Structure formats: structure tokens, C-alpha cells
Image (spheres, grey):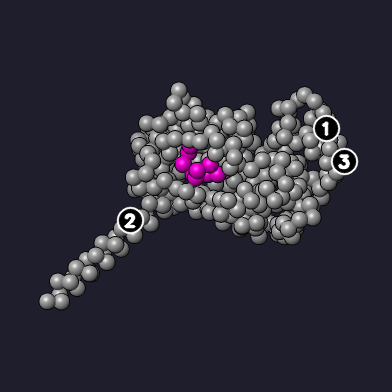
Amino acid sequence: MAFPSLYSSIFCYFAFFLLFVAAFAQSTSDFYSSKCPKALSTIKTAVNNAVAKEHRMGASLLRLHFHDCFVNGCDASVLLDDTSTLTGEKTAGPNVGSLRGYDVIDTIKSQIESLCPGVVSCADILAVAARDSVVALGGPSWSVQLGRRDSTTASFSAANTDLPSPTMDLSGILTGFSNKGFTAKETVALSGSHSIGQARCVVFRDRIYNETNINSTYATSLKSNCSSSGGDDNIAPLDTTSPVIFDNAYYKNLVNSKGLLHSDQQLFSGGSTDSQVTTYSTSSSTFTADFASAMVKMGNLSLLTGSSGQIRTDCRKIN
């Protein structure tokens, strides 16, 4: 009489195992190998072309992924345009007038849709494009877990509250990243994304005119393109040493009081993260390894998988 219950237990265990495997398989690096085998190469080619045309685009695509993930997870909500019933994230304070690369994502999505319609999510495209952008500019690679699905909504309010501000002090930076599950070490590593890219005068004006923990020669050079009033959209490189190469010069600049943003220099200003900045400034390999690991973690924030969300046909609007 014990055999039926034994077989029933085995069956239940096996069924549970299959469910576990299925859930795990929702996010793997070879998710599209059979469904859309040319997906990753298509993204890589498009990113390489975009970065070759404009080096700054590499940083813009990396930032786009970051600004997506920090607002309710990596679900491509940042790509949704406003509608009569939805106020998206594009016009939120941290994004409006500065977030770029939407057209590159549109191009990639269009190319992939022609290859395998309704298969590759916009969220996965953002994650892979960010990785390929870093690689295109000389930075490390990492294995991107795939299988994200796209959100059917966005959050203007969360974009305004959850994204770190360039005016934040160290405590605010650490709290903001901690709220997303990152350690102080991972926070400093992810900040290394500022090894590439540009910032507008309006976000660093106060630092170069009013702060004292900035190299005076550096501040003077910045003032020539960022007056005390006007010229808000004039830009300067976040890394003054090697602005289009992904390396550890960003940290060397911080040690030398050449952080462009207030929030940058806060990482090396007599606080708890000074030692980590010093480590990265002297060891490029340590930085790139830690950065890659932190990017994998960031790319897995609050994913929609399985039957959640959708695969948008157009990244700018819900199906």
C-alpha cells in the first residue's frame, strides 16, 4: 500500500524540479540561441556602428540601461512615450533633456523584429546594448542574463525619486544605491560608468564656481565653456583624462580632485569610500572585474519574466 504514495511523492518532487528548472531558464545568457540566433550579433553590430559614428553614444546607451533598471527594475519602462493615459519617465527630472540613445534602440528593435517578430524584448536589448557599448569603448565584457520582458507601464514619480542626483552628498548616494541592494563597494564600482560620457554645464556649474575641493586649474578650464549664467547645455567630459575610453582614469581624477560632478567627488572627499576609490585608481583590473559583476547584478533588478509583462513590438509603446 505504500507504493502509490511513494510514486506520488516522486512525481510531485519531479514536477517541482521541472518548475524550478523552467523558472531558472527564464533568464539565461543563451535565451535566444534557438528562438532568434542572430539577436546578439545584430545588437552588437548596431551598437558598434552607433559608437563609431559618435563615441558619446556608448555612454548614452549605458546610462539608458541604468536609468531603466533603477526605476522599478530592468523592464524598458524608460522607453515608453507619453500618451493620453500614461505619463512616462522620459520627462522626469533626471531624464528630460539629457537621456539619449532612444533612436539607436529603435533601430535595433526594428532590425530584430524583421528577423524574429515578437521574440526579443526591449529590456534585453537595453541590457545587451549597454554591455556592448562598454566593450566598444575598451571596457570589460560580462555575461548578460536574458529573458526579460517589457513593462506595460512606467513611473514618472519613481524616476524622479529613485535615480541618484549629481548634487547628492555621499550619504545620499550610498542610501540610494543601498535601496536597490548595492553595497558601498558596488556603488563605487558602478560610478565608474562615468569613465565615459559627458555632462551638461547646468549640472556642474555650482561645483566649478562654488566648491573648494576641486583642482583650481581644472575648474578654470571648465569655466571657459560653462559661464556662471547661460550655456546650460554646453557639455564637458565626465572623465577629463580619457573621455572616450572605458578605463580607471575616472578614479585617478577623483584622487586629484578632478571629479566633474559634485556626486563624483563625494566618493573621494574624506569619507568612507576613499579607500575603494584609491584601490580602483591603482588597479584597473580590480575595477573592471568589480564593475562587470555589479553590472550583472544591476541588470537583474526586479525582472519581469515568464508570463509577466510583454514583448513590445515597438519599444516606445505598449502593444
The label shown at residue 217 is 3
The residue located at (44%, 52%) in the rendering is: 29
Q: Are marks 2 and 1 in contact (CB under 8 Å)?
A: no
The quadrant of the picture occupied by the C terminus is top left
Mark 2 or mark 3: which is in front? 2
Q: In the figure, 201 relative to 119: above or below?
A: above
Between disc 2 and disc 3, whose residue precedes? 2
Determine the main secondary structure of the stretch shown in magenta: loop
Q: Of marks 1 and 3, which one's residue comes earlier in the chain?
A: 3
Name the side, left or right, on which 137 lies relative to 223: left
- Location of mark 1 (residue): 223
Tell me which segment is drawn in magenta. Answer: 69-77
Instruction: Please report whichever mark, 2 or 1, sits nearer to the chain's N-terminal start.
Output: 2
Real-space Cα separation, disc 2 to disc 3, in angstroms: 58 Å
Depth check, front residue: 69 or 313: 69
The residue labelled by disc 2 is 22
Give residue 198's quadrant in the image. top right
**Horizontal placement of 99 versus 276: left or right?**
left
In the image, is residue 76 part of the stretch drawn in magenta? yes
- Residue 275 on image: x %, y %: 74, 60
- Residue 279, given in percent of the width and then of the height, sits at 72, 60
Q: Helix, strand, or loop for circle 2?
A: helix
